[in-house]
Image (tube, grey):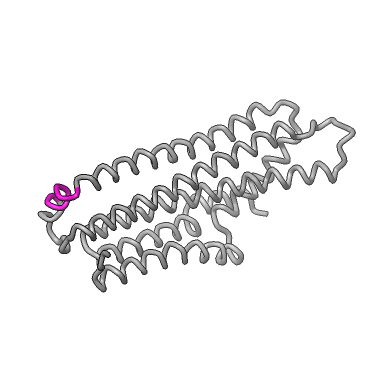
Amino acid sequence: MTELSLMDTLSLLWFFLCWIGYNYFSRYRAKKVDRLQNMLQRYIEEWIRVLHKRDVRIVDTTVVANMERNASFLASSCLLIIAGLLTVLGSTDRAINLIADLPFVNDITRQGWELKLLLLSFIFVYAFFTFTWCMRQYGFASVLIGNAPLYNDKEVTPEERALHIATLSRVLGLAVYSFNLGLRAYYFSLALLVWFIHPLAFICATAWVVAVLYRREFHSKTLRALMAGHPG
């Protein structure tokens, strides 16, 4: 059984509190002020309305394919990272000797090192599942685009058209949300790397990641540009 020091335990609890807490905070905060995903969702809804006015949807399927390609790249990267972490896990003694010579590094034990590597691997496993689910949702969206009624189809009622627009917009929004969760896992994995040096640095790095996420999601120039282009 691996025993963590009090500082390591507190820093790990702080890490999960920040990660899980920020996910809840972001959703709660978005009910009061705009965030990137909310603004993007409005543009998605407008895009789907325009899509219904086109008989040829090559551009639309290309857009979805490009977004799916980004998720596919990151999912593949997760597998490579996991393979690298497992390789390092098999060379624990050599890695400890290398890290121990660095300045400001806290005392490293074999059990603590392996626990940190396993936790880091778990984060990328989570990211892999999140990105692959994102890819599947983009696949569902592609099917819905192919199923979109033609603009001049008189047999389609306005209610049916509105339902299709709402469904496709929702599926694309959920895919974007899954992609965001995967990206957050990447961000927090970088904070976890600092745990190998010192738990206090780990605490600071975790807080810094939360600050970066908050600024980009609620106060970035990109958000202001999207809001300016969609005043409604």
Relative to 103, say whether 147 is above or below: above
Which residue reaches farthest right?
155
- In which quarter of the view is residue 19 placed? bottom left
| Outermost residue to the bottom | 6
The residues colored magenta run 92-98
Q: Does residue 60 show up magenta in the picture?
A: no
**49 vs 93: above or below:** above
User: Which residue does the image show at 33% across and 66% down from the upper left?
Assistant: 12
Q: Main secondary structure of the magenta part?
A: helix
Q: Nearer the viewer, residue 50 or 133?
A: 133
Please tell me which residue is depicted at 85% across the width and 43% down the height of the picture: 158
Question: Quarter of the image containing the C terminus?
Answer: bottom right
Question: What percent of the width, then of the height, locates residue 46?
Answer: 69, 44
| Total numbered badges shown on the rendered structure | 0
| Near-viewer residue (214 or 5) | 5
| Quadrant in the picture for the N terminus | bottom left
Direction left: furthest residue = 101
On whether residue 94 falls in the magenta region, the answer is yes
> Is residue 211 rendered to the left or right of residue 32?
left
- The x, y position of residue 105, in whole percent, is 16, 60
Spot occupied by residue 192 in the image (x, y as percentages of width and height): 31, 57
Q: For this view, does 226 lie left or right of residue 167?
A: left
Give the residue at x 32% y 40%: 83
- Among the 4 quarters of the image, the one containing residue 112: bottom left
Coordinates of residue 174 in the picture (x, y in percent): 60, 49
- Judging depth in this view, the residue of 83 and 209 nearest the camera is 83
Lateral position of residue 19 relative to residue 2, left or right: right
